[in-house]
Each structure stands twice: as C-alpha cells, then as structure tokens.
C-alpha cells in the first residue's frame, strides 16, 4: 500500500483476522491508542473524516464509503479490498446480488428459487415478497441483528467479532463448537461476575457451520461431490432454508415425507411453528435458529442417505457413486505372444549390451581380458590392415596400446599363389 504524500502511517496497527467485522478491527485499533472508534475516525482520517457525519457503527459494517476505507488503508498498510471484505457491501454479489431491497419478488426468486436442493425444480412455486434482501432485514433501521458471538472467543485476551455475528448464517463457533449466544447475555454475565452461558452444539450443526465459515474465510466450500464458490454455497444454504419452510400441503408426497422426517429429527415443530409463510429474514431469532437447525438436520440426513435430493444442486451434497468402467477388449492371442517375445528379446539385448560394456571396461585395466577380447575381434582378420583396424577400435575405447599384442610372425605373409 503506497502512502499518499502528507499522510503519516499510524505507528501501531494490528492486522485484521479472518472473518472479522470492520467495527471489531476498528475497536481493537482504537484501543491501542486508548480512543473510541468515533474519536479515532473523526479526527485522524483527514478529509475522509468528514464522511462520518451521522454515520453509525452499523453503517461501518454495512457499506462504508470507499474513500473511508482507502484512508484507513493508507494509515494501516491493510489493502482497501481486504477492508471492504470486512463489510456486508464487500460481499456483493456473493452474500447478496445487490443491496437494493426494492427488487422484492424478482430478487427473492432469483436468489432462492432459481435452483433447488431437496425439491424438484419449480416445486416450491412462487410467493409474493415486497422489499427483500437475502440474510438481512430490508429496512435500514433494523439492518443489523443483535450480535450473537462465541462465549469462549469473547473471553479471549484480544477478542474479535466476526462479520457473521450480525448475519443469521450460523449457530455455532467453528473453532470451539459451542452455540453462539447473545452478546448482551455474555456482557451481563461478566458484569455480574458469573460464567457466560455455554452450550455445546450438536455435531450436525457444527458440520454445517464449519462449511459456512470455510466459505466466508477462504472463498471456497468443499462439498462431498466437489469444491464450490462461497457464492454458490450461500445460495444453496438459503434455498434449503426456504425449502424446509414450505408447507407440505403444496408438495408432492415424496417431498412432504422428506420435510416431515427433517422436522421430526430436528425435534422442532414443522416450519418452526409458522402458519403463514414468510421469508427467513423476517422471522424472529428463535425461529431463524430453528430453521437453521432443520437445514443442518437435512444435510445430515442427505449425507446418511435417509433422504434423497431431487433438485438441480442436490447432487453436490452427495458423494458420486462408484461407476464400473469397461475394461476393453482382450488383445488377440497372437499379438500377445509377439509382444511377449519382443519384450523378451529386448530385455536380452539390453542385458547383453550391459555385459559387453562391462567387459570392455574391465579390459581398460586388465591386460588378460584385453588380450582375450582382442583375440576374438582379430580371429578372422586376414590382412594386417584388418588387424590394425580392430586394434585401433579397442584403443579408441580406452584400452591401453601396451595391452594389445602384435600379430604372430608370418601370420600375414604374402600369398605364394597356391590354394
């Protein structure tokens, strides 16, 4: 990060942690200088401080001005793109296609019912939805839900608050496996000197939340069939939440039976007790938790094969079954025999070549071996020229000339013309 002329980088600036909300990081940053977040931002960001007039902490986690993030980046060395991912606005178009809630039914059906998981395509039907955003209330005054945090993380020496604490995406802490609790309940217990509430989450809930956290911190979710982008995972999760909220009276018998098994296994009233369908984002916290538990139960039942998926995305939640592959035609026996013989000859030739090379290597240091090889090579030499040619051959291959004898006297005497 290049620092603009005249801008001084703050001497101490802790790094953001994976999944941390912008306000959480700003709180840790301000604490270093014994300031409040408001004091840190309103008096230390230069011209960008003017953008904070009337801004609230909710707005900072929602969609703060880019100029504000760039001013923070220059003073802390943290890239503005990384800071933007610590806000809801930085997760467009993965968490939501847009932050404009006016698209209503169009946005809802595109995000939630364009694909399906449990149900066959189109089985969910249509519902009238007015102003709507996925995962978040559409009205600005109630955008930020009450924070739900991990009691173990909250007791750490330098605690952070993840962005997911304000978004009803998870029920448990992926690190400690305990249920998330209301931030106010934890603060009240600490003020009264009592231990904070602590409940271990069931394994199937932890499994679901670990997948979501993986996506929020790495951008990828590893499913049984393949790894998918976090944007696809968030849509799959929201689609499942919608499917478990649908009345069984409008579904096929097979789909209705699957939903009944899900709610019976989750030990919650069907549809979390709602009698008239409403989007997940408009439900109370208790009913949102019930819907998430039912969704975690559905994933576990899919994994164990107790229910099957019929939707366009359902196959991603199951392992691909074994498929036999054609072994091919057996080769012609004659071809096999020829290949066997050829392979045997090749191996024999390679071995013979290695033996000859070792024999010649020995001849470079052993006169007896050198004379033996030279005798074989010159056995059929009929002229002195042929004899000398074999002698030169061995010398070129490293045999000392002194190891090679001259021809016997009279071996190459001139012919007398009698045969």
Image: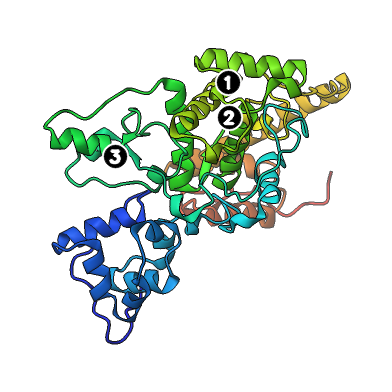
Residue placed at 13% from the left, 62% from the top? 34
**Real-space Cα distance between discs 2 and 3?**
34 Å
Residue placed at 41% from the left, 32% from the top? 171
Sequence order check: which comes first, mark 2 or mark 3?
3
- Secondary structure beneath label 2: loop
Residue under label 1: 303
What percent of the width, then of the height, locates residue 355? Answer: 56, 35
Name the disc covering residue 224, or none.
2
Residue under label 3: 183
Q: Do labels 2 and 1 touch, CB within 8 Å?
A: yes
Residue sitting at the far left: 193
Sequence order check: which comes first, mark 1 or mark 3?
3
Q: Is residue 398 above or below residue 278?
A: below
Q: Nearer the viewer, mark 2 or mark 1?
A: 1
Residue placed at 82% from the left, 26% from the top? 338
The N terminus is located in which quarter? bottom left
Sequence order check: which comes first, mark 2 or mark 1?
2
- Secondary structure beneath label 1: helix
């Amino acid at each position: 990060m290049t620092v603009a002329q005249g801008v001084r980088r703050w001497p101490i600036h802790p790094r953001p942690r994976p999944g941390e909300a912008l306000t959480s990081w700003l709180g840790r940053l301000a604490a270093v200088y014994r300031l409040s977040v408001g004091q840190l931002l309103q008096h230390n960001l230069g011209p960008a401080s003017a953008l904070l007039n009337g801004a609230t902490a909710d707005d900072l986690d929602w969609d703060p001005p880019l100029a504000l993030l760039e001013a923070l980046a220059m003073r802390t060395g943290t890239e503005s793109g990384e800071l933007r991912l610590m806000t809801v606005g930085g997760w467009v178009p993965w968490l939501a296609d847009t932050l404009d809630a006016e698209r209503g039914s169009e946005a809802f059906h595109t995000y939630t019912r364009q694909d399906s998981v449990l149900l066959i395509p189109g089985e969910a039907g249509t519902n009238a939805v007015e102003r709507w955003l996925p995962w978040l209330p559409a009205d600005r005054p109630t955008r930020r839900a009450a924070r739900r945090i991990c009691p173990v993380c909250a007791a750490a020496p330098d605690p952070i608050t993840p962005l997911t604490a304000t978004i009803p995406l998870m029920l448990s802490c992926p690190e400690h496996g305990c249920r998330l609790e209301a931030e106010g309940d934890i603060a009240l217990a600490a003020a009264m000197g009592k231990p904070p509430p602590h409940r271990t989450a069931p394994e199937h809930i932890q499994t679901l939340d670990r997948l979501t956290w993986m996506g929020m911190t790495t951008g990828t979710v590893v499913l049984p069939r393949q790894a998918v982008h976090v944007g696809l995972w968030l849509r799959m999760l929201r689609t499942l939440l919608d499917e478990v909220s649908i009345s069984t009276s409008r579904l096929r018998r097979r789909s209705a039976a699957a939903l009944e098994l899900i709610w019976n296994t989750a030990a919650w009233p069907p549809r979390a007790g709602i009698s008239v369908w409403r989007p997940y984002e408009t439900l109370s916290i208790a009913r949102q938790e019930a819907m998430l538990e039912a969704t975690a139960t559905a994933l576990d039942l899919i994994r164990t094969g107790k229910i099957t998926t019929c939707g366009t995305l359902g196959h991603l939640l199951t392992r691909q079954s074994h498929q036999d592959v054609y072994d091919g035609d057996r080769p012609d026996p004659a071809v096999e025999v020829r290949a066997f013989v050829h392979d045997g000859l090749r191996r024999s030739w390679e071995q013979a070549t290695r033996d000859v090379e070792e024999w010649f290597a020995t001849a470079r240091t052993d006169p007896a071996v050198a004379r033996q090889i030279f005798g074989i090579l010159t056995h059929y030499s009929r002229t002195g020229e042929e004899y000398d040619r074999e002698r030169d051959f061995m010398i070129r291959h490293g045999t000392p000339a002194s190891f090679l004898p001259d021809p016997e006297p009279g071996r190459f005497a001139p012919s007398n013309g009698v045969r």
